[in-house]
Amino acid sequence: GMVVTGLHTRKIAGEKVLELLSEAGYEVNLVEVRSISGESIEQVKEEAKETKTKFMLGVGGGTIIDTGKIASFELGIPFISVPTIASHDGIVSPRASIKDKDGSNPVSMQVHAPLAVVADTEIISSAPYRFTAAGCGDIIANYTAVRDWRLAQRLQNAEFSNYAAALSEMTANMIMENVREIRNKDERSAWTVVKALVSSGVAISIAGSSAPASGSEHKFSHALDMIAEKPALHGEQCGVGTIMMTHLYGENWQRVREVLEG
């Protein structure tokens, strides 16, 4: 097996995961990656081939998990996600984001969903709260994403799954209804946000596309990634996008803003 991790996350959880797997009798190697790029994915794949890796774990934030997800998908081996922050639904979805050839624009690609997600709420709750708040922004985006999806079905006959849409909206409701509890910034709040991110990722898997969790509010975020000198966190940008798109739908955008302000 192989543990893909980063410089910081190696100390937080990577070495512990390696130790637990070794104790359980697995032969595991650890690979440290600095950023997500074609080179880092190739590096992980090369090391995995050399060591005849049968499974891969990504221990870290979004970049680490996406690197592991893409590499394991291209190698055709199972992937397990071990997030150290709960900042977006990439920890469980069958999508991954990588910069294009010239390194300027992020490109989203279809890969495979993790076989399992192992999230230590103690680690996640001790990470800066900004990441967890961003995770909430990414989930609340499901409201406008599902509205856009329904519109696409009506106007363009897009494939639509009532089940995936209902799950996605239920997930956003989970954040809206538990906002006070989440603001406690404890293990319970980390658990609530991780649970919501997992069900959001499952909705994407059911739909076979990112439609239930990514609509016009994500387009706004992608545009910021391209033009902003210093883009904010993905979930923060999607949260702002959701306020704008909710306003355009003539819905209660003030309520969305209230929840995200915390």
Image: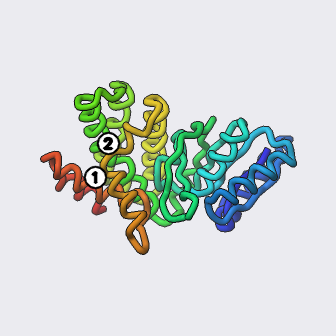
Residue 89 location, x and y as percent? 47, 47
Camera-side residue: 40 or 86?
40
Query: Is 42 on the left or on the right of 142, as rendered?
Result: right
Q: Is residue 148 visible from the viewing direction of this image?
A: yes
Q: Which residue is mark 2?
A: 145
**What amino acid is found at the position of numbered circle 2 in the picture?**
Ala
**SS under mark 1:** helix
Residue 144 location, x and y as percent? 27, 44
Q: Quadrant of the C terminus?
A: bottom left
Which residue of the protein is positioned furthest toward the bottom in this rendering?
229
Q: Quadrant of the N terminus?
A: top right
Residue at 65% in and 57% down = 38
Query: Is 39 on the left or on the right of 139, as rendered?
Result: right
Asked if residue 105 is positioned above or below residue 110 in the image, the reply reads below
Tell me the crowding category of disc 2: few under 14, some 14 to 19, or many 20 or more residues within 10 angstroms, Cα based.
Answer: many
Which residue of the protein is positioned furthest toward the left in this rendering?
250
The CA distance from mark 1 to mark 2 is 9 Å
Residue at 43% in and 30% down = 207
Camera-side residue: 199 or 150?
150
Q: Is residue 61 visible from the viewing direction of this image?
A: no
**What amino acid is found at the position of numbered circle 1 in the picture?**
Thr
Residue at 37% in and 37% down = 212
